[in-house]
Image: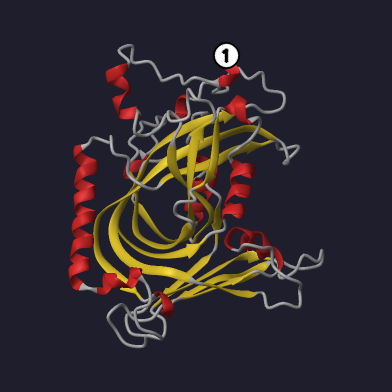
Amino acid sequence: MPQFVQSVANQQTPPPYHFPGVTAHAFVIDIQMAAVQTYCDTYFNLGDERERGFVYRPFSVWPYALLMVVQYPLMINTNRTELGLDEIPFADRGYSSQNEVFLAVPLVRHGVTPQNLLLNAAIEWALPFIVVDNSTSAFSGREILGLEKLWGRIDLGSGQFPNGFSASVEIPGWSSLDPKAMQRMRRVLHITTGSPLPGVGHKSSVTSAWTMLESPIVLKSFQGLADAFDSLVTMSNGVIPTPMRLVALKQFRDAADPHRAIYQALVGARSKYYDIANLTLYNEQDVAITLDTSGSFAEIAKIFLPNTPGPATADPKVSIAAHAAFGFTANLDFDEMSTLHTFPVEGDDCASVDGGGAGMLSPWLRPWWGLINASGADPQLPNESAS
């Protein structure tokens, strides 16, 4: 990946980042496998399958997505790179804060030949919808990380019931696709819950296996498992990969022709939650999630919904059912950013294209590579196009 060059003319800050004391609310919702496959084919499965040597597919074993709302009271850049020119290192530039809403979709990646079928295997997460209310975070996320971050307004509250939760997301959009329509801030997403379990104001009794977590015994067991898993990850020195390894398509566009990419690569990063505490459960029947599918929001609706929105006469406000809803506090680190695979582009001599798929090595194998490869060279996986 081309090296990021810091300039005093902008506020972009490259990773790693440390986010202590975040508060997260998660909602498990249905995701359509056909829509996920279309997303994979559009953004990840570029070019010829046998030439690139891998394929992304929906993780059909768990056909759900996580709709996450995260509050970041402190956003700290821990990059201590010496910049020169008397510039202040990133880690000494103070902190920022933000609210964030995103949809996380699990994907499975594997090789396409017998040689690299398992060596390329990994479970990763895509973020096809992500909104932040911090403009610096939006610019850095798009330009440095390749994430599809949108800037917007995110209002958080408690809802109608004691200790409940609510979130409202507004982003710039058009109410119609008429050429004369003017862009304005419009609410695209609204979320409300009832009181935490056990509590008052519930529409129904326990209706699913998820809500059995309201039991204090189960809650303590859940927290114990979370602590044990965190310790296991630490002791294994990364051999057991942490969840939420993100993947995104990073592109540089031609200024004269915005539809043409002059650089494109799959990039990855690790998003690790730890020291999880204050687990809060909500009855999923008390959760109301409303998505606006009108105008320019129809593109966003394709990600959430099985079909494209109906005719203009239909109600554009669509309700999305939640299978589970919970909140927690934690520390969050965002690090281990790497280039997974670079794709050839028009006019490129392909000299810098990663055809061997070194970045595609499975997370379970990477920590052991130094033991099985005495030379210390980067792994070169078998590739059908090279044979």
The residue wearing badge 1 is 387
At a point 76% along the width and 74% down the height, the residue shown is: 312
Q: Is residue 162 visible?
A: yes
Q: Is residue 6 left or right of residue 343?
A: left
Image vertical order of residue 115 relative to residue 247, above or below: above
Q: How is the image coloured?
A: secondary structure
* Three-letter code for the amino acid on which mark 1 is drawn: Ser
Q: Is residue 55 left or right of residue 73?
A: right
Where residue 190 appears, as percent x and y from the top left, is: 52, 73
Instruction: Label 1: state its secondary structure.
Output: loop
**Observer-nearest of 72 and 299:** 299
Where residue 52 appears, as percent x and y from the top left, is: 58, 28
Q: If the image is split into quadrants, where does the C terminus sit?
A: top right
Q: Which residue appears farthest toward the top when viewing the image?
A: 375
At a point 56% along the width and 50% down the height, the residue shown is: 148
Q: Which residue appears farthest toward the right when viewing the image?
A: 179
**Observer-nearest of 329 and 123:** 123
